[in-house]
Image: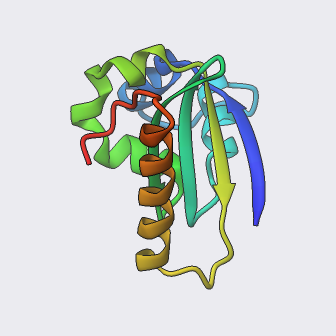
Amino acid sequence: MEFKTVNYDSKIIKEGISHKGRRKSDDPVKIFSQQLKDQNVLYFFYKDDECLYIGQTGICLWDRIIRHEDPEKDSKWFEEANKICLIILDKKVDVISRRNLESTFIVNYLRAGHKLYNKE
């Protein structure tokens, strides 16, 4: 298991969606996408020290965002977040275990009185 924090700006995601073709190595979208290439992760979108959203994915988070997050792209948490914290899980952790870990984090955050934008 490994932990990683990545600075986040939703404008980078939106630029990444609209751009076609190759990017230069110093392009902010390319750099950001490379930081989110780990697979089998739990992810936490934060605004400063406040957790806004908790999720999980078996594919890399960049692909998850680009391919599957369209409804959330206009969500408050997606716009307000300024960092993403990742827990990179061992490849042996399966989807059921990953979902259970996600649910455990969500329940504990809510029980502690924190608000989340999760719908689950």
Residue 91 percent location from the top left of the image: 63, 79
For the point 74% across and 34% down, the residue is: 25
Query: Which is more toward the observer, 17 or 35?
Result: 35
> Which colouring convention does the figure follow?
rainbow
Can the viewer see residue 58 in this picture?
Answer: no
Q: Quadrant of residue 41?
A: bottom right
Q: As drawn, is 21 to the left or to the right of 2?
A: left
Q: Is residue 71 visible?
A: yes
Determine whether, in the image, residue 10 is placed left or right of residue 3: left
Q: Residue at x 52, y 21 (%)?
A: 12
Place residue 39 in its image quadrant: bottom right
Whether residue 15 is situated above or below residue 4 in the rendered picture: above
* x then y, percent, for residue 57: 46, 60
Q: Residue at x 65, y 40 (%)?
A: 85
Q: Residue furthest left?
A: 71
In this view of the protein, which residue sits in the foreground, 25 or 31? 31
In-image side of 60 versus 96 (left or right): right
Question: Is the N terminus in the top left, top right, bottom left or bottom right quadrant?
Answer: bottom right
On the image, the x and y values in percent for residue 45 come to 53, 33
At which x and y percent is residue 112? 51, 36
Left or right for 41, reference 21? right
Tell me: residue 89, above or below residue 18.
Answer: below
